[in-house]
Image (spheres, grey):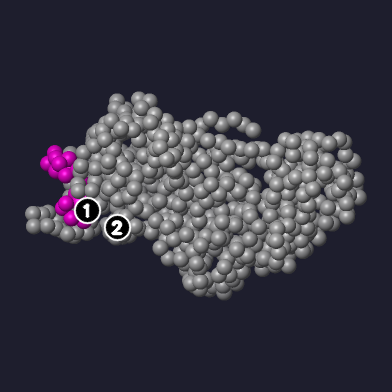
Amino acid sequence: MKSRTFSPYVPRPATLVSKSPLSELVTLYEFVLDNGKNLAHKPGQFIMVSIFGVGEAPFSISSAPIKESNVFEIAVRKIGTVTKALSELPVGAKAGIRGPFGTSFPVHEFVGKDTLLVAGGLGYIPIRSLLHYQLRHRQEFGRISVLIGTRSPRDRIFIDQIEALAKGGDVEVLETVDMPDANWKGNVGVITTLLPKAGVEPQNTHVAMIGPPVMYKFVLRQCREMGIPSERIWVSLERRMKCGLGKCGHCQINSLNACMDGPVFRYTDIESLEEAI
Amino acid sequence: MTAYTVQMEQLPGLLAAWSTQCQVHVPVSLDNGFYDFGPWRPGTEIAFEYDVAYNPLKRFFMPPREDMVVFDLETYSAKPVFAAPNILLFGVHPYDVKAVTQLDQLMESGSVDQNYFSRRDATVIFALTPMAVSETAFWASVGADKVDQGYDLYWTKIGPGTFHVEIGSGKGEELLLAAGPLSPATAGSREAARKAQVRARNLGLRRKLNYDWHETPHVMGRSWNASLWHRKAEKCLGCGSCNTVCPTCYCFDIREEVDEKLKTGHRFREWDGCMLNGFALVAGNHNFRPQASERYRHRYMRKGKYIFDKIGELGCVGCGRCVRACTSKIADPCEIFNTLWEESRHEI
């Protein structure tokens, strides 16, 4: 028998270096790997985060890859056992990290082109990784438009950063909420109501979208109506990921595995798959 | 191919020799006509004429529950676990060998599953030409009546007390000759083995697909909206028995437990099944396959198309275990594939 010493199932220890609330239920966590190494992820990828004794769950990375920094971020909504344990984790405590896993947004294809980023709800978390990458290399990209749709104003995350972005002029930011409160003065309605306002040049634009399952069909239809070619539309699809290695079967989308073939797919690669959108 | 002739009376000596090196498992008769693989000990009666082992062999390479990682909560360190006893499986039917070779390919593709191969590499497989066929089997019609790889020895009973044994690997030959030299196979014994294999195939064709199995992915590709999925799934209890007994199903969940002092723990994988309601459930209670018919369809798409697209083989070896295990009598791949093929012929 060949001797085996490496297992992709063994998490690497990491330390929680900061946590800050983003909304009532969503918290931003900053980690560093204990070996001091850079996570070396790409925008759109995800990691499996372990809290020993509780379990493991997949989370999108929300920070841009930065060579000079070994800090990486996830933003997590408290909704299950692992996320609850994570919310109770004090700064300085350990967690286990596997990954990064999966495909990423092909930023090299976006170079010189306009980018339309469409984020529904928590979809802004992985979109933010791409957006911040593009902002760090701002001169390489054309116009960047970010559309953000949230259920209600109190569910908005990264509010200060997004407002600063909107004012900064580097990117165009359009926001909407489905259910406004008395103080909301912005756009009301589903995210598709923002697309006509974005002033997209269809022949020069790449689209990256992430949101709740119900969002994709409508945004895709509108993109096509606007004349954006399907091969320049990128979608990140959520599924239940347990192993991250294309084996456990939970994240299958027809014959593809979201954990390895995705989560980021070129739309033309999945448009014929009945289970994708 | 090198082959030998082995007499029945030589077997106890061989089994005794093998059992000094590995855990030897052989087909044995359980109650009321059920057979399964069980550990061999001197005196164990081998059920050479078994029709199908109740449990699939995947349990030897990917046990129902298998530790993957042990961790220490105080130091926050973790180590891999690679458990792999030396095992010899004697008397494995070709369709089960085929199922194992499929698992080998699927576990090797992409990220190699080291835990699987720890166990697989420590396992020796001695195949056996079937002498009886389960009433629910249809393996001969899906190309699983004979295999040319995946075994270390291939045994065929050619007389009341005589076996023809083909060598599949150096390890197999070494084990075969462990108790002393054997007679090389003659032309006559080779011909007798060929005839026994033809007989097995003919027996195995009592139930069959009504078309060439290579067409299955095309049939499945046209059947996404077939009414059959709903008709069958109406009776599905969602118990996952078909997944559990299937030799090519390998989906799993990952869970963990800690000791009572909360100091150490272990993370394990355990069999899961796509027919279970929560299989595609994500946080926030969104289920990507909420309907039983969607889960039912997914399972057959996986057997008939998705696995085929990956490895060029039907992901069902026709063992018929699921037919017998299903309490609702809706899990019969032979019937499903034939019905969909018949329906697809009438599509305009």
Residue A157 lies in the magenta stretch: yes
Residue A152 percent across, percent down from the top left: 18, 55
In this rendering, the answer to whether B138 lies above or below B346 is above
Q: Nearer the viewer, residue B176 or B3?
A: B176
| Location of residue B293 in the rendering, given as x and y in whole percent from the top left corner | 47, 67
**Quadrant of residue A133 in the image?**
top left
Of residue B137 and residue A127, the one placed in the foreground of this image is: B137
Query: Alpha-carbon neighbours of circle 2 within 10 Å: few (<14), some, or many (≥20)?
Result: many
The reply to whether discs 1 and 2 touch (Cβ–Cβ < 8 Å) is yes
Instruction: Look at the image and give the residue range highlighted in magenta.
Output: A148-169
Quadrant position of the N terminus of chain A in the picture: top right
* Chain under numbered label 1: A
Residue A24 appears in the picture as rendered: yes
Q: Amino acid at mark 2?
A: Met
Residue B94 in view: no
The residue that appears at 44% across and 43% down in the rendered structure is: B257
Question: What residue sits 70% from the left and 66% below the top?
Answer: B135
Say the numbered circle drawn on residue A215. 2
Considering every residue shown, the one lying at the far front of the view is B261
**Which callout, 1 or 2, points at the residue further toward the start of the chain?**
1
User: Which of the two residues, B132 or B216, is positioned nearer the viewer here?
Assistant: B132
Give the camera-side residue of B213 and B284. Answer: B284
On screen, residue A271 versus residue A183, left or right, reads: right
Crowdedness near tag 1: few (<14), some (14–19) or many (≥20) residues, C-alpha within 10 Å: many
- Mark 1 lies on a secondary structure that is strand
| Magenta residue check for B204 | no
Where does label 1 land, which residue?
A149
Q: Quadrant of residue A53?
A: top left
